[in-house]
Structure formats: C-alpha cells, structure tokens
Amino acid sequence: MVALVTGAAGFIGSHLCDMLLSKGYEVIGLDNFCTGNKDNIKHLINNNLFMLVKHDIIQPISFQVDQIYNLACPASPDYYLFNPVKTIKASVIGTINMLEIARRKNARILQASTSEVYGDPEIHPQNEGYLGRVNTIGPRSCYDEGKRVAESLMINYHKKYKVDVRIARIFNTYGPRMAINDGRVISNFICQALKDEPITIYGNGEQTRSFCYVSDLITGIVKIMEQKEIIRPINLGNPDEINIIELAHMVLRLTGSKSKMIFKPKPEDDPMRRKPDISFAKEKINWNPGVDLEEGLKRTIQYFENILPNKKE
Ligand code: NAD
Ligand code: UDP
C-alpha cells in the first residue's frame, strides 16, 4: 500500500508518517515547509519506504497511490492569519488537487478537518450533527470557511465521482514536534514556563478547550482511513475539558516554573467553549483516547526541554 501524506513535515503529519511506516506502508511525504520543519522527518530520510517531495498543494501534481491523507494547511491561528489568502487556497484549491489525484488513481482520501467548522458553538459538547456558528468575515474565517469548503468538496466528489472519502474533524491536539513559535496555547505555555517568562493568558482565561494527545489522534485518523464506508464527518478529540487558567496552573506545576501569568486581549471570534462529543467515533471505529492531559503534558514538556534554546538552567 502506498500512502500520500500532505503536510508531512508538520506536527501531526510527521507522526502520521511514522505510524504508517511502522505498519509497512510506503509513504510519500509532501510539504512546502511553510510551517513544517525538516527536523520532524529527518529520521525518515534514509528509510527506503519513505520519499519526501517538496511541493505546494495549491499546484496540481500526480502520484500513483492507494491512500491520501490531506493535512497540508497552516493550522495555528498565528500562522493562518499571517497569510489568510494562502490559507484559503490550501484548503480549497489544494483539496481539489488532492481529490483529483484520488479520482484519477482510484485512491481513498482523508481530509483533516477541524472543530473550527463549529465556530464559536452554541451547543455543548459539539456533535457531528451541529452545523456550527462561523463568522464568514471574521479573522478566523480563512481557516474555518476554508475547511468547511474542503468538507463540501469531499462530499461532492463522493456524490459526483464516487471518490472514497473520509473526513476527520480534529479537535485541539498537542504533543512533541509542535513548533516552538507556532503560537498555540500548549507550546506557548510550556516554552514560557521553561524560560520563566510570563505565561500569556488571552482574555480572562475562562474559555475552555479539550486537548488530545497526538498518538491518540493518529490512531483515530488511521482507523477512519482503514474503515470501510464512513463518508460522514467524524469527531476526533479528547472530551476532557479544561479552562485556560487551569491549564496554565498545570503547566506551571509540571515544569516547576516561577513564571507569572499576564493577561492579554482575547482574539476576535476566539471560541468560548469547546469539547467533542465522540460517541460516533466510539461506535463506528471503536476509538477512545487513552493518554490523559497530565501524562501528555509531561511527555511534551520533556520534548521542549530537549529542543529549547536559552531555557533556564
Ligand atoms: P502544522 O502547521 O504543524 O502542519 C501543517 C503542515 O502542512 C506543515 O508542515 C506545512 O508546511 C504544510 N503545508 C501548509 N500549507 C501547505 C501547502 N499549501 N502545500 C504543502 N504543504 C503545506 O499543523 P498540524 O497541527 O500538524 O496540522 C495538520 C492538519 O491537521 C492541518 O490540516 C490542520 O488544519 C489539522 N488540524 C490540526 C489541529 C491541531 O490541534 N493540531 C486541530 C484541527 C485540525
Ligand atoms: N491562548 C492563550 N494564550 C496563548 C495562546 C492561546 O490564552 O498564549 C488561548 C486562545 O485564546 C484560545 C486557547 O488558548 O482560547 C486555545 O488557543 P490555540 O491557539 O491553541 O487553539 P484554538 O484557538 O485554535 O483552539
């Protein structure tokens, strides 16, 4: 089996390549390195089953493959807001290009969608039937609406051309290989704590998220791909909800840091509450995340301790 992984040099994509290679797949890892990092995949370069291709999915390309995991897209708010038009293009034109490979080569394709399709939700927890509350002209829309179009493209390629599609709605995921500077809350808090720098809380910190450790997520993604006939979107996330202040306290405790908390303005349209309903994933692919937040944070802290320049002694 040959799998194409777009976004292979990114945080999630690099772990996915590891998992597929360990299962005996041949893997083509594609990335334009706009937010990814060669260090995430350097251990794979001499693996005969792995091939790295530098390419932007906004440009058409073709491969003979059995499966496509389409993960290429800037994912952290800081990065996707840096170039919003490119972000939309990655989700829309990029997804069309990947669907065209799937259509021509008869490959199964999985789209990395997101809990952001629910926007700032009015129902809690969020299940797949909820249609979402996204501000089409807000700053986050380049990402949210791009991903919503990507889902629509998947469903319409299935209806029109019988392409075998999968849609994973991924909730906040964390772990080793997150980029130091990508601006997401877990990497920010850990790096700030390890340097005894102020922990930046946006807003009053009462907003919640539910964090899934990366190995759990990868297991879920691969299970969705391997399952027959599962066209509907499927939530993947850890339902263990925590507010941002509690998260900051936890990171401070686990790092033994002396950092103080400082408060900064809450970004526009930043969702207040987020927690996945994973009943469908449990029923359909028998998936349940197993790594709790404390254990996952310890592993992630260890990773950043090893790679962080200028950390405190
Ligand atoms: P990441 O930024 O670490 O990885 C994205 C990768 O895609 C990077 O290596 C980047 O260089 C590459 N890329 C971006 N645009 C590209 C393009 N046009 N052509 C080729 N490569 C391109 O982010 P991540 O956290 O690993 O996210 C991976 C996927 O999962 C994304 O699609 C993201 O939307 C989705 N997702 C992630 C989370 C999360 O919490 N990490 C949550 C929901 C959805
Ligand atoms: N956040 C924060 N401090 C930071 C980075 C993020 O308080 O240094 C908050 C952010 O406002 C949001 C939550 O943490 O409410 C999760 O942010 P992240 O960017 O990790 O993910 P997303 O907003 O995409 O869920």
Image (cartoon, rainbow, N blue to C red):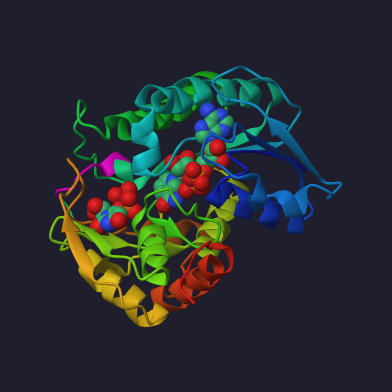
Rendered image quadrant of residue 101: top right
Q: Nearer the viewer, residue 173 or 117?
A: 173
Would you say 26 lies left or right of 216 here? Answer: right
- Residue 118 falls within the magenta-colored stretch: yes
Residue 79 in the image, given as x and y percentages of width and height: 40, 38
In this figure, what is the number of numbered marks? Answer: 0
Secondary structure predominantly adopted by residues drawn in magenta:
loop
Q: Which residue is at a point 24% across and 45% down the rendered structure image?
A: 130
Q: Which residue is at a point 57% across and 60% down the rendered structure image?
A: 219
- Residue 127 to residue 233: above or below: below
Q: Which residues are magenta?
A: 117-122
Q: Which residue is at a point 41% across and 68% down the rendered structure image?
A: 195
- Residue 9 to residue 205: above or below: above
Residue 202 in the image, given as x and y percentages of width and height: 20, 55
Would you say 148 lies left or right of 310 here? Answer: left
Would you say 64 lies left or right of 202 here? Answer: right
Q: Nearer the viewer, residue 284 or 91?
A: 91
Residue furthest right as drawn: 48
Q: Nearer the viewer, residue 158 or 65?
A: 65
- Residue 127 falls within the magenta-colored stretch: no
Residue 39 in the image, given as x and y percentages of width and height: 66, 50
Residue 70 in the image, given as x and y percentages of width and height: 55, 36
